[in-house]
Every structure is written in C-alpha cells, then in structure tokens.
C-alpha cells in the first residue's frame, strides 16, 4: 500500500518529500525550556532524572484534568453531586500508607495544590500526592501507574516545585497531539545533553522504518527492547493519520488504545518514560511490561504481526539466562543474534519485521552468524537489507549498521533480496550531526514501495536485487559490498620520461628564479 498521508501532522517522504512533523510552537518550546531550566537551577542536572521527574508531574496533572472533564460532563447532566464510579479522586479522605495520615482527596488534585503556598505545596506533593500515584499500581489508571513502585521524588526545594508546576500548568494535557510533540522535544533535549543518549534511536531513522513497514490498523505491534518507545509512538502517529476515520469506530479505538502496541524493557525508568510517551500520544493502556525479552520470562510465540526494533547489540549473555527456545535455534551469547531469533519466534505466520542490526550480523563467519542468515534466507522471506553509514548513531556510537526486513513464513520462500546502499541520511556523519541537503531516505522509501521498478537496476546502482541462490553460494553473506559492482575509471598516466621532463623543466625554472633573486637583491 503506497499511501501518502497529508493531514497536516504526518506527511510521508515519498516522491522526494521530506518528512514534516508538526513540531511545537515557539511559545510552548520556551515554556518547556523554562521548565527544564527550573530543574537544573534546582540541582537536578542529570537529563534522565529531569525527564523522569517531569513525567511524575505530567501524570499528576493528567489525572486531575481527566476527572475535571468527567465532572464537567456530569454537571451538565445534572449529576454534579454524585461521585463518579471510576473517579480517581474520591470524596472524603485517603489514607496514606507511608505516613499513616488521612489526607483529603481534594488536596491530591493538581487544581487544588497548585494554589497552595510554596511550602504547603511542596509537603503535599512530596509526601501525599507522590505516594498516592505510587499506590495506583493496582488500579487500571494507565500502564504508566504500574511502574511507579520504585519511583523517587528528587525535587528538594519548594521554589523549584512552584516554578515547574507553574510551567506545566500552562500546557494543555488534553491536547494529546501537542503533548506528544512536547515529550518528543524533551526526549530530544535529553539526547542533546549527551547523557543517556544510548536510549534514543535517531527519530528520522525510526520514522523511515515505520514508513517502510506501513503499520495497519489491524496490526499487533511490538518492540521487545522498547526504551523510550520511539518505534511504538511513531507507529501511533502513522496509524492515526492513515486511519483517522476508522479510529472513530469503538472497536478500532479500543484496539488502538489497549491491544495494538506492546513493549518490553528491563529498566523501570525506561518503562515509565516509554509509558508516558505512549500515553501522551493517546495510548494509555498498552501492553508494556518489565521483562527481559531474551530470558524465560518471555514465552510469547507466534503472536505479533509487526515487530520494529533497535535491540541492544553490544553485549553477550550467559547461556543460563537465555531462553532455551532461542538457543535451540541459534546457540550464541551475542545479543544481536539472539534478538533476531526472538523476532522470528514472536511473529505470527505472515508477520513482518524491520530491525536495526550491526554490520557483523550480515557477514560474521561464526556458526551462529551463518545459521541465522540461513534461517532468514531459507526458512523465512528475507526482503531487504538497507546498509546505513557508520555516522548514523553518532555521537553515541560509530558502529556501521543496517536495517533487515523480513516476513515470517517458516518455508523456503526467499526468491531475491533487495539491497540499498544508504550514503546520507540528511545529517552530517560526524559527532555534530548538522542537517545537510544530501538525504537518501525519501529515495529508499519510494524505491521500497515500488520494487517492480527495481528489477532493471544493475549492481552499479545504489539499489539492486540479488538472487537468493547467489547469497547461498556466498556463505549466506548479506554484506552489500559482496554484491555491489564498483565502476572504476581507467586512468592513463604519462610515460615516465614525460613526467621526468616536467620535473627537470620545473627545476630549471626554480634555479633561474633563484639566480635572478640573488643578482637583484644580494649584491
């Protein structure tokens, strides 16, 4: 399905167009910058801590805003005095299990405590409101609330809290599109600060992969190493734009909100940040779990229709902690190979996968490397290898990577594989990553969705097909340089005596100039 999505919030980059995202306005950007600076001047300078503390306060405001909206509707229907059955903030008192004190529910609400004095607000939020949201884990409030048990409130000064609350109060939490952009901007600030950047895949690469895979409204999408949930969030944007009318139907909206998106991670901070990222994009109850995807904790098999991921690929694991079903297919300690094997297991028949891998996966000579590639070529349908330049992940890593795209078939079905040699991604390939004109991404997407036009290309072109049998004959190597034909120009040099004659002539001219200089100036 070659679809152009032009609703003002998400524009595809087909036919040479650059992706256009709405982005936040200057006013909101200044508000977010001021909130960020309030944390820093208040002594919280680790960017991931700043982001996490912001999510706590976002959640507090979102809870109250949601109930205020429900109460307004009830008042319009003449039921203003009746307690809503699913109210988070009830009438009467809440017993704080940590302080053993009873606190009026109304004091826990953003609309109330934001009007307190600085000291009263600080004590209320630190001791009561924060403990309240930590104990919401048993309630079906959101996926975010399930990961609050080990959260820590780091704000130490009343004035810092007042400034941050004032800043957040100016943001419209009910406008999920804008809040999604706000969170994306904050994640960008986290990456730009140079700390915890490893958690953030380049958003333009994620966006490219989502457009390559074209998520459908019926998909069950998973990222087994989700981090900040970038692939899932970008998929929400694509689906909302592509299926705007269909999402008005209750069944579709329920699937989008609850069953469509799944993500796993082992880091509680990432689970909170990722869950908030999804919630601010309209997905408040995704299947987000604290889980080591490669371990026996993860028993999912044959369920997901689409997996997109940039899994960890810098480490090794002990055999004892790896799921036996993965080792039975690929006996290795390398995480990049284990994750690819996991993706095959987790997909249903006909399910699709797009994953970033280090180049070593494409040409490694170990038994496990070759076995994985053999599995992809012989037992699944390997569709594409997109080779990316080494600077794509700078300044955090200089490793060369590629995108592997395949469909699970469990039968020999790879006929030919499409290769693309990406040379530029729209940014300089040094540590600064400044925006530049050269960008192959629009061309990659346009060509991938029009593969029938690729058949006539030669190995000298930037993209081309390679027959599966040729790949088998080359030890299942998927390195693009193994198949790319480099056109070399024949250079004809002058004969040695001609070159020597030029040297002698030049030497004579130099000697003559020196003698003239001596005669004129050194008498």
Image: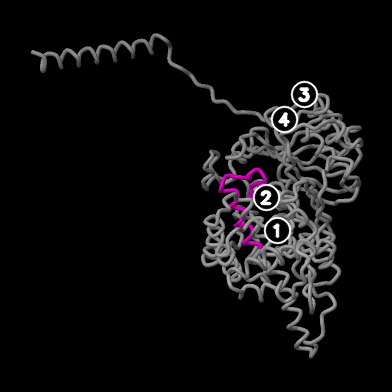
Which coloring applies here? one colour
Question: Of tags 1 and 2, which is closer to the observer?
Answer: 1
Q: Residue tagged by mark 2?
A: 208
Quadrant containing the C terminus in the rendered view: top left
| Residue 180 position in % (x across, y down) | 66, 62
- Is most of the magenta stretch helix, strand or loop? helix
Neighbours of disc 4 within 10 Å: few (<14), some (14-19), many (20+) = some
Range shown magenta: 180-204
On screen, 493 above or below 57?
above
Left or right relative to 520: residue 122:
right
Magenta stretch contains residue 482: no
Q: Residue tagged by mark 1?
A: 277
**How far apart in space, not on screen, are marks 3 and 4 (Cα)?**
9 Å
Identify the residue at image location x=70%, y=60%: 237
Q: Residue tagged by mark 4?
A: 360
**How far apart in space, not on screen, are marks 1 and 4 (Cα)?**
32 Å
Identify the residue at image location x=79%, y=72%: 94
- Tag 2 or tag 1, which sits nearer the N-term? 2
Question: Of tags 4 and 2, which is closer to the observer?
Answer: 4
Left or right relative to 118: residue 302:
right
Q: Residue 365 carries which label?
A: 3
Quadrant for residue 137, please give it: bottom right
On screen, 200 above or below 243?
above
Neighbours of disc 2 within 10 Å: few (<14), some (14-19), many (20+) = some
Residue 455 or residue 285, whichever sits in front = 285
| Residue 67 position in % (x across, y down) | 75, 76
- Tag 2 or tag 4, which sits nearer the N-term? 2
**How far apart in space, not on screen, are marks 1 and 3 (Cα)?**
39 Å
Q: Is mark 2 on a helix, strand or loop?
A: helix
**How far apart in space, not on screen, are marks 3 and 2 (Cα)?**
30 Å
């Amino acid at each position: 399905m070659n679809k152009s999505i032009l609703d003002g919030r998400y524009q595809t980059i087909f036919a040479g167009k650059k992706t256009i995202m709405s982005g936040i306005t200057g006013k909101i950007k200044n508000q977010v910058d001021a909130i960020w600076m309030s944390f820093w001047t208040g002594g919280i300078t680790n960017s991931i801590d700043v982001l996490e503390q912001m999510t706590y306060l976002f959640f507090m405001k979102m809870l109250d805003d949601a109930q205020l909206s429900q109460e307004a509707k009830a008042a319009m229907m003449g039921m203003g005095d009746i307690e809503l059955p699913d109210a988070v903030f009830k009438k009467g008192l809440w017993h704080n299990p940590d302080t053993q004190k009873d606190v009026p529910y109304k004091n826990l609400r953003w609309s109330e405590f934001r009007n307190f004095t600085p000291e009263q607000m600080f004590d209320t939020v630190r001791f009561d409101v924060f403990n309240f949201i930590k104990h919401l884990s048993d309630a079906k409030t959101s996926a975010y609330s399930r990961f609050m048990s080990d959260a820590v409130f780091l704000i130490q000064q009343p004035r810092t809290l007042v400034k941050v609350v004032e800043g957040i109060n100016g943001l419209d939490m009910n406008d999920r599109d804008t809040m999604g952009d706000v969170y994306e901007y904050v994640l960008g600030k986290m990456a730009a600060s140079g700390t915890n950047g490893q958690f953030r895949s380049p958003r333009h690469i994620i966006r490219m992969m989502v457009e390559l895979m074209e998520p459908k409204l019926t998909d069950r999408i998973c990222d087994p190493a989700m981090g900040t949930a970038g692939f899932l969030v970008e998929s929400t944007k694509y689906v909302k734009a592509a299926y705007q009318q269909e999402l008005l139907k209750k069944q579709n909206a329920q699937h989008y909100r609850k069953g469509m998106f799944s993500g796993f991670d082992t880091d509680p901070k990432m689970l909170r940040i990722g869950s908030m990222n999804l919630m601010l994009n309209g997905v408040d109850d995704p299947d987000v779990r604290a889980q080591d995807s490669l371990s026996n904790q993860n028993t999912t098999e044959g369920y997901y229709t689409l997996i997109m991921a940039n899994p960890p690929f810098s480490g090794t694991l002990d055999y004892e902690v790896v799921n036996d079903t993965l080792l039975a297919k690929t006996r290795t300690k390398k995480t990049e190979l284990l994750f690819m094997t996991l993706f095959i297991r987790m997909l249903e028949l006909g399910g699709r996968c797009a994953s970033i891998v280090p180049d070593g996966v494409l040409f490694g000579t170990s038994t496990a490397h070759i076995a994985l590639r053999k599995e992809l070529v012989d037992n699944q349908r390997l569709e594409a290898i997109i080779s990316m330049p080494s600077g794509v992940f700078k300044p955090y890593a200089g490793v060369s990577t590629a995108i592997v795209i395949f469909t699970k078939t469990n039968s020999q079905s790879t006929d030919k594989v499409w290769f693309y040699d990406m040379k530029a991604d729209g940014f300089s390939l040094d540590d600064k990553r400044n925006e530049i004109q050269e960008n192959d991404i629009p061309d990659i997407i346009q060509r991938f969705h029009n593969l029938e036009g690729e058949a006539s290309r030669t190995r000298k072109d930037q993209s081309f097909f390679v027959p599966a049998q040729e790949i088998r004959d080359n030890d299942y190597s998927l390195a693009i340089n193994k198949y790319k034909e480099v056109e070399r120009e024949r250079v004809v040099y002058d004969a040695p005596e001609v070159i020597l004659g030029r040297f002698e002539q030049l030497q004579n001219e130099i000697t003559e100039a020196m003698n003239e200089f001596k005669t004129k100036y050194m008498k």
